[in-house]
Amino acid sequence: MNNRLHDDWERLFDQLPVDTTAREEHRKRLKTEALSAYEDRPTPRPQRLRLKQIGPLLMRYKAPHWTAAAILVACIIWLAQTGSAPALAVDDVVDNMVQARSACYDMTAKIAGQPAQKMKAFYLEPTHFRQELENGYINIADWQAGKMIGLDPKTKQATVFNLVNVPADAKGKMQTNQFEAIRESLRKAIADPDRKVESLGKKQLDGRTVVGFRFETGSQPTTLWADPQTRLPVRIEATMVGPPETEVVMTNYEFNVDLDKSLFGTAIPDGYAVTEADVDASPPTENDFIVALTMCSKSTNEFPTGLDPLAIAKYVATYLHKRGMGKGKGPTAEQLQEVLRIGRGFQFALTLPAESNAHYAGDGAQTGDAERAVFWYQPTDSTKYRVIYADFSVKESAVAPTVPGAKND
């Protein structure tokens, strides 16, 4: 019954017309009730009928004044059936987000100990993504097309990344941007039979009533606040426990909006200096990790203090400084390729599964010490450990090394 009434708005008023000569208080009350009933619909629509549109719509229908009471009763029955504050299923919210064809929203990322980064984000299916940082820098990505560009309007520098060596089984499945990643994470959370989703109830957010849910998704707890009428998110808060702890807040969502495809063009504007590099999309290997450690330690004369993202970022920054990079100039193609190679190597250690029992003990190790184990892990389906030493040699061991201060990474 509810769907038919919602879909046949004008037919409802044909059956129960409005008396434009009715008393003013009746007309005002009727408008409010009708608006609430209309917006309490079960499925989202891109455009919502506003109060200023309701008035002219009602004024088009004329009848004896008693019909105003009849339609008011109809609205009350309608509201009683649907509820003025309808129950909201989190599955519907996530499903609507997954089906969105486009979106734009504000995003703030805060890494512990660092200033917050604010940006505007735009998504257009199938894989187009654009970020506009508050400092003017622009990122445009379409990894399905194998390309991402970064534009710095202040310096007229453009950086182009080309995706290469994409595994055949990964094509068409890659989470190529932040919007796709967050909605895929939510989709998996609600599909999990052992899911942990906590209802947070209702609250007022920027003058509107929203309903909240908290997802316990491993190391990234996520809170979602949704509009019970549109059944779409209005705010998503994700915390990556780290270290370092990183908070990402996405607000002011607009879904299924018209976005010009030119926003996502990867052609470089005239007048920009271009630096280009390839990004290897194949799975990183143990050798990639050893190469990264070798490159950095030979320039810094030390190993990272840890393998968490913050420790790695500081370590790589030291490497770049030692190499004379980033002193007011954009990186050369060779320098950019070095950075990508280092990042790929550390990715190996960061993405090992928990069952690999990986440990890092490089803090304070002396480069070239053949007796000092700095990293060890168990490969999948192996009973032995692979142990990397400070001279970058590798040996297998039936037992894990014992090194004071070793960190479980």
Image: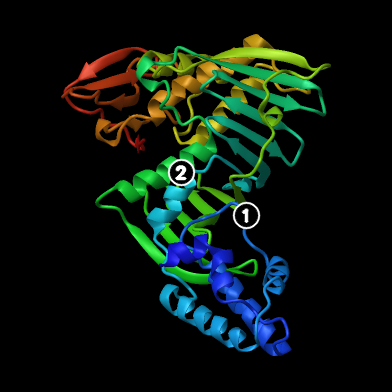
* 283 w.r.t. 306: above or below: above
Badge 2 or badge 1: first in the primary sequence: 1
Judged left or right of residue 357, residue 407 is right
Front residue of 182 and 84 = 84
**Which residue is painted at 45% across and 12% down in the image?**
165
In terms of depth relative to the viewer, which is nearer, 378 or 91?
91
116 over 173 or under it: above or below? below
| SS type, badge 1 | loop
Q: Which residue is mark 2?
A: 98
Name the residue at 76% across, 21% down: 157
Residues under labels 2 and 1: Cα distance?
19 Å
Disc nearest the viewer among 2 and 1: 1
What's the residue type where badge 1 is placed?
Answer: Gln
Q: Secondary structure at mark 2?
A: helix
Q: Which residue is mark 1?
A: 47
Q: Residue at x 58, y 70 (%)?
A: 14
Q: Residue 233: where, in percent of width, then height?
A: 52, 55
Residue 310 appears in view: no
Q: Which mark is residue 257?
A: none
Give whichever of 149, 82 is nearer the camera: 82
- Mark 1 surroundings: few (<14), some (14-19) or many (≥20) residues within 10 A: few
Quadrant in which the N terminus is drawn: bottom left
